[in-house]
Image: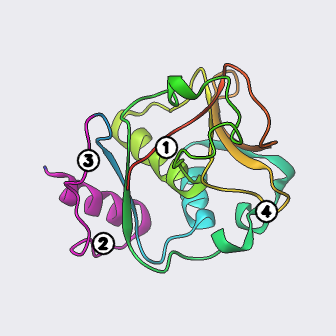
Amino acid sequence: MNTTIRDQCFYEEFFGFVPDISTISMSMGYRDFNCPIVRPKGISVNLVWDVCKKRFKCWQYDGFDLESLLRESERGEMKETSVRFFRTCVEADEETKNRSVNDIARLRGITLLERLIMELKYFSETGEHLDIESWTLCSGSRFSDGSVPCVFYAPPSGSVGVCARDANDRNDHLRARGTIW
């Protein structure tokens, strides 16, 4: 099954609609950036998070809905369908470990929406989770206070978590996921 059909089936199964992806090129992957994440018109962070919570255990800091914490430009539904390509790997990018989001400011990084879609897609295909040993810094997103959303899997509790980190935080387990358009 090709990527286009697989993505349409994914959205129909989990969100009850088939996105129109006829206007986007799914063949733009480059080298090891071969994992397309479609961001369909009409989808939002809260919608994806709600679907995740129905499929597996989830935890978020402060207990607020995620969109209320995001900067205003990331709230609400996507206005148009688009796609970005990431590496197909369980852990976030090795070359970004021990580097803060501010250190890698030029990197086109994954957004919180994209990372949650990636988690849901990976779980639906494998029954497993991403970021077992590392945490993905969603360097393409910001909470309204300037902190960076971070997504991880906590094996002891068996839950996927979303928390916030300062844009200057760095250590071996905090990593970004780079992308190409």
Who comes first in sequence, dot 4 or dot 1?
A: 4
Who comes first in sequence, dot 4 or dot 3?
A: 3
> What separation in Å lies between label 1 and label 2 (alpha carbons)?
19 Å
Q: How many other residues sit within 10 Å of disc 4, few (<14), some (14-19) or many (≥20)?
A: some
Q: Residue 29, which numbered label? A: 3
> Is residue 76 positioned above or below 7 on the image?
below
Q: Residue 69, which numbered label? A: 4
Which amino acid lies under the numbered mark 2 shown in the image of this protein? Val
Which amino acid lies under the numbered mark 3 shown in the image of this protein? Gly
> What separation in Å lies between label 4 and label 2 (alpha carbons)?
28 Å
Element class at badge 2 = loop
Q: How many other residues sit within 10 Å of disc 3, few (<14), some (14-19) or many (≥20)?
A: some
Residues in magenta, as a range: 2-31
Is label 4 in contact with label 3 (beta carbons under 8 Å)?
Answer: no
Of marks 4 and 1, the one in the foreground: 4
Element class at badge 4 = helix
Q: Residue 119, which numbered label? A: 1
Q: Residue 151, which numbered label? A: none
Who comes first in sequence, dot 3 or dot 2?
A: 2
Who comes first in sequence, dot 1 or dot 2?
A: 2
Q: How many other residues sit within 10 Å of disc 2, few (<14), some (14-19) or many (≥20)?
A: some
Residue on which disc 2 sits: 18
Who comes first in sequence, dot 3 or dot 1?
A: 3
**What scheme was used to colour the molecule?**
rainbow
Residue 136 lies, in percent from the top left, at 60, 36
Residue 55 lies, in percent from the top left, at 52, 48
